[in-house]
Image (cartoon, helix red, strand yellow):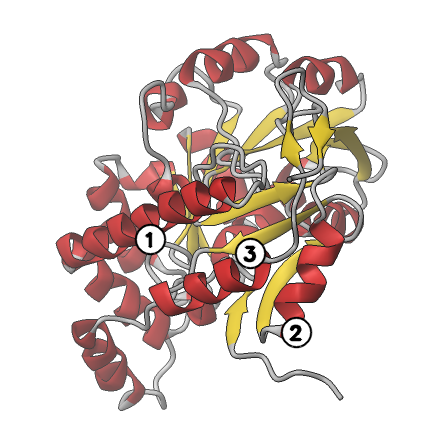
Amino acid sequence: MSVPVVHRLSLNESPYPPLPAVRDAMRRAVAQAHRYPQFHPDDLTERIAAWCGLPSDHVVVGSGSVGVALQSLQAVVRGGDAMVYAWRSFDAYPLLAGMTGARPVPVPLSPDGRQDLGALLAALGPRTRVVVLCNPHNPTGSMISAGALSAFLRRVPRHVTVLLDEAYVEFARGPGLPDTAALLGAHPNLLVLRTFSKAYGLAALRVGYGLGAPELVERVRRQQLPFGINAVATAAVKASLRAGGELRLRVDTVVAERERLRRELAGLGWHVPEGHANSVWLAAPDRVDEGARALTLAGVQARHFPGEGLRLTVGGRKANDAVLTALAGLGAPRRAADGAYAERS
């Protein structure tokens, strides 16, 4: 008999529903559901641009960051062009390549679960039109530093569009974080992807945006679906931008819980790398497959990559405690000083 899911920690969703003020704005918008939204989301684009401190011609809005990524590929890729990305990563990347006729070129992560920037550069060829970076990385949560990102961008040919997926950037902490807005002026082939699904808790409403140079943004905007951003989603995003302080407190709480999970899992013998997303990554050779089974039996739904790793979304405290309880009794291996693994005593 299957165990019912009590804690859904598989999709890196926010543990919090929309704020009351955001729900009020959504209800008011629902009352006008018989009216079409704007043909193109110009008002929302201007609002997001002002919030980011950029001119509106640097911003494109779409159906989640994945929707903006699709528009971007439609704008720059022709059949047979190559799309380079690290793997494992966000599952949508190879799907988007297939949808747009691009040839996917996955590049393995480094042994410590990071995107191998040197290998990505080496994979660029004469037919490459797009290279994707995910920063913070999904699913490992690793971070490309400001210096490494800048050096990478300088080496990418200008005819190759760089999609920098920053879906989790609000959860990143510490020194050396990239200032991507500052990079836009120096790299007209850079498009930064962001979303309101994660930190802002609007995953069901599907709103994301891209930041880039005006010429690239204009090409991407030509792929926008008319009436593609609904009025309820628009109202929710605008209300969320007005509630920035309250939402930052929520993000800070998620980050604090992430760090608590890391510490306590490490205390149980799991090797837990530093992460910058709203998740924790456990990787083989730790007993990730056994861990996945234990979580399932405890009613915790996590993202399991058999034989590779286990991504645990940071939930509320009760959900995180359920994770710790489920994994506590597995006798996970402990990494020895030489980097090998030894059984816990």
| In contact (CB < 8 Å): disc 1 and disc 3 | no
Residue kind at label 1, given as amino acid type:
Val
Say whether disc 1 or disc 2 marks the residue closer to the N-terminus.
1
| Secondary element type, mark 1 | helix
| Secondary element type, mark 3 | helix
Name the foreground residue: 61 vs 112. 112
Is residue 139 visible in the rendered image? The answer is: no
Which residue lies at the image location 38% right of the left edge and 26% below the top edge?
A: 180
Q: How crowded is mark 1: few (under 14 residues within 10 Å), some or many (20 or more)?
A: many
* Dot label at residue 199: none
Residue 282 figure quarter: top right
Residue kind at label 3, given as amino acid type:
Ala
What is the quadrant of the N terminus in the image?
bottom right
Is residue 268 visible in the rendered image? The answer is: yes
Locate residue 274, reporting x and y percent.
Answer: 47, 32
Which residue lies at the image location 21% right of the left edge and 84% below the top edge?
A: 28
Locate residue 147, reporting x and y percent.
Answer: 44, 11
Q: From mark 2 to mark 3, how far is it between C-alphas?
A: 13 Å
Locate residue 103, reporting x and y percent.
Answer: 83, 37
Name the residue carrying label 2.
297
Say whether disc 1 or disc 3 marks the residue closer to the N-terminus.
1
Name the residue carrying label 3.
328
Q: How crowded is mark 3: few (under 14 residues within 10 Å), some or many (20 or more)?
A: some
